[in-house]
Amino acid sequence: MRYGFFPGCAYKTAAGYRESVEALNRALAIQLVEIPDWNCCGATAVFSINSSVALVLSGRLLALADLHGFDEIITVCNACYTTLRKAIHMMEHHPELITEINKHLKTETLQLKRLLPVRHYLDVLANDIPEMRWRKVKQSKSDSDLRVAAYYGCQLTRPWKDQGQPERPDVLEQFLERLGVTVIEHSAKTLCCGASHMIPYAKDCAPLVSRIIREVRKKNGNIIATICPMCQFNLDAGQGRLNIPGTPIAFFTQIVGLALGIDSKDLGIDKLLVPMYKISDNKE
């Protein structure tokens, strides 16, 4: 399975995200081929400042992916996902925007010809991998101590409504349960973590982190599975300001790796700020 991969700016420095994604790719024979010379998509911030610039950034990524023979783009970041989806939506409804984008791309001899589908890596794992392949690579039973709270954040399911019910999605829960992971239901799965506001407005964002962590603990969850570098960082680092026991914040790919029996060292679990002693293979 070969996909055009847009890693985004935070992927390689996120706490074990790259390690765990690459470990799953090796185990499942997935080829995520990085789009050559990719650029930042601008995240959600650039759209709020200058939509024309934001569209050129997204348009360039789409043109590069098409140029190198990819039929779709896979990303691992909610902000990248929704930014590209938003740009494509605007171009679909206003084709004249493509003409303007191509004027800018002309300086690089690039041309935006196709609006390629954009998907999250979660979608690939949940829907593209045959069940027999999962059974083949699964080496052990899932850790019985693991009670996972899925956390989607506020940008994957809204406003697209194609990842299940936008306010109460369950695609991650269903996927993890297929692998034998115990998941818990809670009401904070699509609440905002503060996103990029966490840096300049940390004090104001602390209550956002607190309500998510407290809700998960109230429902007896002992770990949160995230699907976005920004969400993971905010919930992991943000707990240092809260007067409550720490809850590990892992990437969903790390949880999947543990469920398959992959060594925790290969999943980058030691990079999490709140440790996962009870659910890693190096228990204390």
Image (cartoon, rainbow, N blue to C red):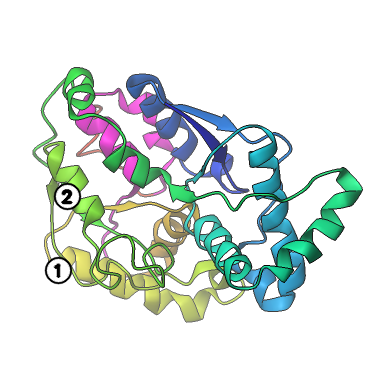
Q: What's the amino acid at mark 2?
A: Gln
Q: Residues within 10 Å of mark 1 (few under 14, many from 20)?
A: few
**Quick one: SS at disc 2?**
helix
Residue at position x 14%, y 63% in the image? 185
| Foreground residue among 142 and 157 | 157
Against 224, is 178 above or below? above
| Stretch in magenta | 244-273
179 with respect to 127 (left or right) = left
Residue 136 x %, y %? 19, 18
The picture quadrant where one finds residue 265 is top left
Does 237 lie within the magenta span?
no
Against 64, is 81 above or below? below
Residue 121 x %, y %? 41, 43
| Residues tagged 1 and 2 counted as in contact (Cβ below 8 A) | no
Check residue 82 in the rendering and tell me which mark sits there, or answer none.
none
Find disc 2 in the rendering and name its residue.
174
Residue 75 x %, y %? 50, 46
Q: Estimate the spatial distance between the alpha carbons at disc 1 and disc 2, rounded to whole Å.
A: 21 Å
Residue at position x 70%, y 37% in the image? 67
Outermost residue toward the right in this view: 107
Residue at position x 45%, y 58% in the image? 237
Quarter of the image containing the N terminus?
top left
Q: What's the amino acid at mark 1?
A: Lys
Residue 284 visible in image: no
Of the image marks 1 and 2, the number of the one nearer the N terminus: 2
Residue 239 visible in image: yes
23 with respect to 45 (left or right) = left
Find disc 1 in the rendering and name its residue.
218
Label 1 vs label 2, nearer the camera: 2
